[in-house]
Image: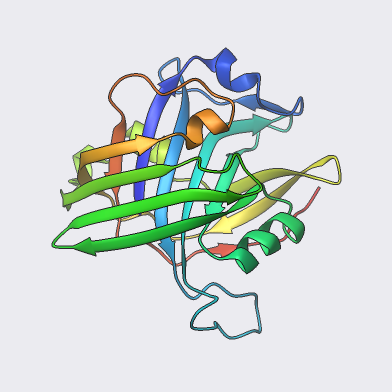
Amino acid sequence: MTFVHWRYRPEQVQALLPAQLRVETFDGAAWVGLTCFLMRDVRVPGVPALPWLSTFPETNVRTYVRDARGRTGIWFFSLDAGRLPAALGGRGGFWLPYFWSDMSVDGENGHTRYRCRRRLPGPVGARCDVDVEAGVPLAERERDELAHFLTARFRLFSLVAGRLAAAQVEHPPWPLHHARLIGLDQSLVQAAGLPAPDGQPVLHASPGVRTRVGMWRW
């Protein structure tokens, strides 16, 4: 998994959030993340993973928010998935803004290439090409407050039938590595309604963790 984050003015992000949520800031800025990864063994409880259906690339555009009860979590602007059934299930069954995209993830010798071209529901052709080289693990002193803010997230928010809902997320701490951006050509952030990112992003890479997502609760 690769985390790519940029600073934004809080008001730019807040304008795209539902009224029940407030953007969460760090160092005076809102943060928008482009997270690229490969999903493996995706399944619902009690159902075995299926070889083709349960493994697919995904790329998300997200930010960090707080609700009226003070709970923090993730708000997704978009989730692009490389399997049509996954996109339909995520959009129709889990109330998240999934999109079906032509996607791939290839890697060797620490160099990973993510490719994404959106198909449905559009805007058709919105893209995300990321080439990144993973480095050594972060030392304990490098796992600072910003790294924690950007990656240690254990709740999702969404609007379910017009009502704000939250789902708990369980996973161990991400094993974070340094990362070097080799190439980036993307328009998913702009497709979400945000200005194009400006400035150098903050990068982290990870070999991944096993994750469980609960059901929506109000």
Kindly identify the residue that appears in the image at 53 percent across and 54 percent down: 101
Residue 176 versus residue 125: which sits nearer the camera?
A: 125
Vertical arrangement, residue 161 with respect to residue 22, above or below: below
Residue 116 can be seen in this image: yes
Query: Could you tell me residue 211's position as x and y percent?
Result: 50, 64
Q: Is residue 208 left or right of residue 74?
A: left
Query: Could you tell me residue 12's position as x and y percent?
Result: 56, 16
Vertical arrangement, residue 92 with respect to residue 45, above or below: above
Q: Quadrant of the N terminus?
A: bottom left
Q: How many marks?
A: 0
Residue 154 can be seen in this image: no
Vertical arrangement, residue 72 with respect to residue 131, above or below: above
Determine which quarter of the picture holds residue 202.
top left
Kindly identify the residue that appears in the image at 45 percent across and 14 percent down: 28
Kindly identify the residue that appears in the image at 60 percent across and 48 percent down: 155
Query: Could you tell me residue 210's position as x and y percent?
Result: 45, 67
Residue 144 versus residue 2: which sits nearer the camera?
A: 2
Q: Is residue 63 left or right of residue 204?
A: right
Q: Is residue 173 left or right of residue 49?
A: left
Query: Could you tell me residue 142's position as x and y percent?
Result: 22, 38
The colour scheme of the drawn protein is rainbow
